[in-house]
Amino acid sequence: MALPEIDKLVGGSSAPSRTASARFSRLSRIRRIVYWPLVLVCAILIAYGLLICWSAVMVDPDYSFSRQLMGVALGLIVMVAFWAFDYRKLGNAYVALLIASVVLILSPHLPVIGVTTMGATSWINIGIQVQPGEFAKVTVVLFAASMLARYGGKLDDVREYAKSVALLLVPFLCIMTQPDLGTGLVYLFISAVVLVMGGAKLKYLLWTLALFIACIAAVFVIDEFLKYETADGTYEYRLLKQYQRSRLFVFMNQDNLGSTDEGYNLQQAMIAIGSGGMFGKGLGSATQSALGFLPEAPTDFVFCVLAEELGFAGVLLLLGLYAALITLCIKVAKECDNLFGMLIICAIVGMWLFQILENIGMCCGLMPITGIPLPFVSYGSSFMMVNFAMLGLIASVYMHENRLGKGV
């Protein structure tokens, strides 16, 4: 065979090889950018949450499932934007992030756009009603992580610790002007997780916990002195709303649940959960919410709708998806070389865990009733967009700092 023919054969055999190599390189690059197990788990969780939310809102004209779908669509855009953004650029921007948090949280107090609903000034109307305190969760996470990352994982100076705690309390104090205790508790839990993971000394953390408990007790004692009698013979309190006190007392004493509105709500929630049995009554067959017994079914008590319709099996599926989500996020955090990125993921995981445990716990009578929604399941376009933003931040950390993503 002539040499040119041999060269032709060799050249012809190498072209497909180069094509295959290029395809493998592109596939490897995508794998380094996208953490596919997390994407799969999130996709299943979001679809499952939408199914439950659809069932919860279908019998309630006050809610619109199309609005929830709009929140998902906008959330996907927000997630991609955060994913593409290099989060490391915010590593030293804790002052700007704190200011952004304060502006967002206090914006409902602005005239014209501020909206007061059920005694809380938590919304703004800019053509559509949104809840800035929800969006502030993103800036609070970034602010807390950015501030604690400056100490390199070791916060052992008492003055710096006191300064950090004081700054972390600012978003909580701002949200209490609305007031929105549920969201405020989320801010506090984010701050606590970042302090622990940021290297604060154990004795400082214990002192802070003791002071926090003492402050709660002081609020109740002071409120007893500040209370005043109204015209109908009942008492009003200045520091805590009556419904907030009632929720706490119902949690501590569940012997007579029907005596207050909060006790009635908990009673109906527990009836809904218990009536679901092992496999539930079937999707769309929740009688407690359909007949109006279960209050705020698509938002605060959506877990009860799930338990009633799909039973213990449906609950186990949801808990399994949450466990997979948390586990995969922790894996990304452990493989992160950047302290700022690790603290971001820890703060997000802590926030989700607190919301999951509090929402499910309050439905079962294991936690006080609050207005804390269930991640990726509860109705609320603002809430859904924030959860997508958190996913975008985790994806950004994975892509830019995780060892699996290096070389991209």
Image: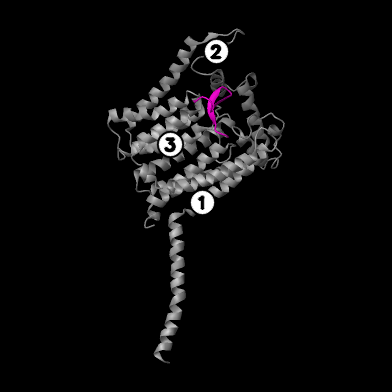
Crowding near pointer 2: few (<14 within 10 Å), some, many (20+)?
Answer: some
Q: Magenta region: which residues?
A: 110-127
Q: Nearer the viewer, residue 91 or 168?
A: 91
Q: Which mark is residue 39?
A: 1
Mark 2 or mark 1, earlier in chain: 1
Is there CB contact under 8 Å for labels 2 and 1? no
Tag 3 residue: 139
Crowding near pointer 3: few (<14 within 10 Å), some, many (20+)?
Answer: many
Seen in the picture, residue 99 relative to 310 is either above or below; the reply is above
* Scheme of image coloration: one colour
What is the spatial separation of the Cα atoms under label 2 and label 3, in whole angstroms? 35 Å
Q: Residue at x 42, y 82 (%)?
A: 10
State the SS at label 1. helix
Q: Nearer the viewer, residue 277 or 81?
A: 81
Mark 2 or mark 3, earlier in chain: 3
The type of residue carrying mark 3 is: Thr
What is the spatial separation of the Cα atoms under label 1 and label 3, in whole angstroms? 23 Å
State the SS at label 3. helix
**Image quarter of the N terminus:** bottom left
State the SS at label 2. strand
Q: Position of residue 103 (x, y in %)?
A: 44, 30
- Give the foreground label among 1 and 3: 3
Q: Position of residue 189 (x, y in %)?
A: 44, 32
Q: Nearer the viewer, residue 146 or 297?
A: 146
Q: Position of residue 271 (x, y in %)?
A: 66, 31
Tag 2 residue: 236
Residue furthest to the bottom: 1
